[in-house]
Image (cartoon, coloured by chain):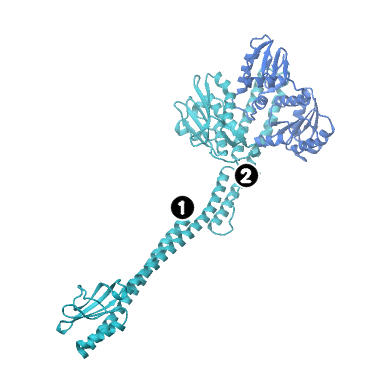
Chain colours: A blue, B cyan
Amino acid sequence: MRILVIEDDAGAAAYVAKGLREAGHAVDHAADGTQGLFLAAAEPYDVLIVDRMLPGRDGLAVIEVLRATGNRTPALILSALGSVDDRVRGLRAGGDDYLTKPFAFAELLARVEALGRRAAPEPAATRLKVADLELDLLARTATRGGRPIALLPREFRLLEHLMRHAGQVVTRTMLLEKVWDYHFDPQTNVIDVHIARLRQKVDRDFPSPLIHTVRGAGYRLGP
Amino acid sequence: MPAFARTTWFRLALLFTVLQLAVVLLVLLGVYRLTAAHVDARMDQMLAAEIEALETVFRRAGLPGLAREVAERSEQGLDSMIYLLADPRGGRVVGNLSGWPAEVRPDGTVRTIELTDPTREGRRVPVAARAFGLPAGHRILVGIDRSERRELQARIEIALAWAVGLTLVAGLVVGGWFGRRALRQVDVINATTTRIVEGSLGERVPRSGAGDELDRLAENMNRMLDRIAHLMGGLRTVTDAVAHDLRTPLTRLRARLETALAAPDLTEGARRSLEESVQECDRLLGIFRALLGIAEAEAAAGGEAVAEVDLAALATDVAELYGPAAEEKGLALELRTGAGPVPVVGNPQLLAQALANLLDNAVKFTPAGGRVSVVADRTDDGRPRLAVADTGPGIPVGERERVLDRFVRLEPSRSTPGHGLGLSLVDAVARRHGARLSLEGATPGLRVVLLFPGGERRLRAGVGAEAAGR
């Protein structure tokens, strides 16, 4: 993917760029809002990573201008401000995701890849299929190898999210945000227990597990 | 009792009215006494003069002369005078009185009697009368009608009634008016302070411009609030500085550690200590996040995220999130919601986080086999209520206040993970929503209750945070 990082802190920018390049992405860097806006408008990027507080032009303003001109490139906002209000403001300005500094690189990478995937217009699928696991989104049923799996509504949504991002790393925070719509970190890791439940139902009776734990990052669903 | 009647103004007005009434009564009583004494004296004089005149006639012209004089005076004299010349048996000889009143004896003393006076349409009138015996057994009675004095008394009574009535009405009206006016101003001040306590720190008390004591009070309150806003602004700057200046280097530190972890030639020991360092970083960052979250909740920011939140749905969701974790620990998690939604106005994320913190604690501290219950309902008087109860060790009564303070962890819990900020956040969120947080003993265990204000209430936040110089 081609990614633009708009970040004034050189150290943070270098760290992000280096990590993204190692993950196989092409990265451009802009050190202020004006340059960032210019680049983002001129070049076709898959994802923008925008720091909220920038010299010259505020990160939210950059996104607002882009959106006003019809540019729909997915944007991830980075901010040292973690309040609910700031998040709401960021998303209202046209940001697609919001990550509070400091973050683990794995978290950033997972979110950037999820956003990049979203850019490709997804057909309005009514069935999701990964290996022999199938999800019928209309009937809300799951089968693996033809055998039905009984899922609770929340488990279904959890599995659906994992399957929509099959092959990608999905972090615990992402799951909490996307499946439960909670934007805080619970002290104990409640998500792990939910995943363990899901694993029991999806993987236990089958030789090859589909839900994998990615160390230090989160989970990945795939063969 | 209407509200204005309980104001100091009204009470003062009432007190002054009573005092004024007392003065009016005293003055009128004094006037009455003086006037009555004067009238009495004049009547006594008139009576004495009349008797003297008749005595002179009697001495000069004897009984026949006296009879003539009496007849003449009865016909043409003053209306108020009463004469009767009687024979020794008491029969009328001449005069304007029909018969001798039994209670008057001819001994020269003054006697006040009630007479039915034919010349005054048969009214009974008070009369001061003196009677004298004449030689040959005749008697004469001279009297003066004192009903004038009674009329005076009646007039004074009417004046008194008017004075009392007018004073009372004036006192009550003026007192009520001042009371209402003061109450309006005080109500404005109270409403403003309530909003400020709820978090709209940018609110100021409107001035009436009258320059009176309430206006000066409002001015001083505003100055005090400006000072508080200034101090809070300073505090917020410090928090922001902590957030920025400490979190940024910590982020870099964490990034370096992650980069170091990515190196392929690490020994197992080095890897483990790097991983532990990353975890330590995360723990520190978690504490910062929690502290800033509390600061945020307390400073009443988050206005844009305010919405109507159904506590029943919220409880269902959060309980569902913790369900597997509770089951894993061998706890029964029980959810009780009343019939229908329990709406409050607030920040859904903060409320969910508060409930999550409570459930987190409950699951953490309740030993296996216990029970955790979440309740979202309304109290009997209709106030929304959110409660989490467990069958854990509970919190001793004396410690319940203290656990709301930041970083406080009770001795037995030191071994469990956590940073002692969970309940502080719940407390901050509760205060932010005008809810009362109480920690109660269950038998056994702990019951934490959030009692929200009832009625139609709109959360006015954000505006205040902006105005406070954010």
Name the residue furthest right.
A42
x and y percent of residue B37 in the render?
31, 75
Q: Which residue is mark 2?
A: B464
In whole angstroms, how far apart are the C-alphas of marks 1 and 2? 32 Å
In this view of the protein, can residue B415 be seen by the observer? Answer: no
Q: How many marks?
A: 2
Question: Can residue B324 be spotted in the picture?
Answer: yes
Q: Camera-side residue: B33 or B229? A: B33
In the rendered view, does B53 fall on the left or right side of A204? left
Circle 2 Cα neighbour tier, 10 Å, few/some/many (<14 / 14–19 / ≥20): many
Q: Nearer the viewer, mark 1 or mark 2?
A: 1
- x%, y% of residue B356? 58, 28
Q: Give residue A205's quadrant in the image.
A: top right
Q: Chain of mark 1?
A: B
Q: Give residue B348's position: percent from left, percent from top.
A: 61, 33
Q: Chain of mark 2?
A: B
| Label 1 environment density (alpha carbons within 10 Å; few <14, some 14–19, many ≥20) | some
For the residues bearing labels 1 and 2, Cβ distance under 8 angstroms:
no
The amino acid type found where label 1 is placed reads: Arg
Task: Look at the numbered disc 2 and give the secondary structure of its residue.
Answer: helix
Of residue B222 and residue A164, the one placed in the foreground of this image is A164
Q: Which residue is mark 1?
A: B6
Q: Amino acid at mark 2?
A: Gly
The secondary structure type at the circle numbered 1 is helix
Q: Which mark is residue B208?
A: none
Residue nearest the observer in this picture, B116 or B335 = B116
**Is A138 situated above or below B2?**
above
Q: Is residue B221 above or below residue B250?
A: below
First reached walking from the N terminus: tag 1 or tag 2? 1
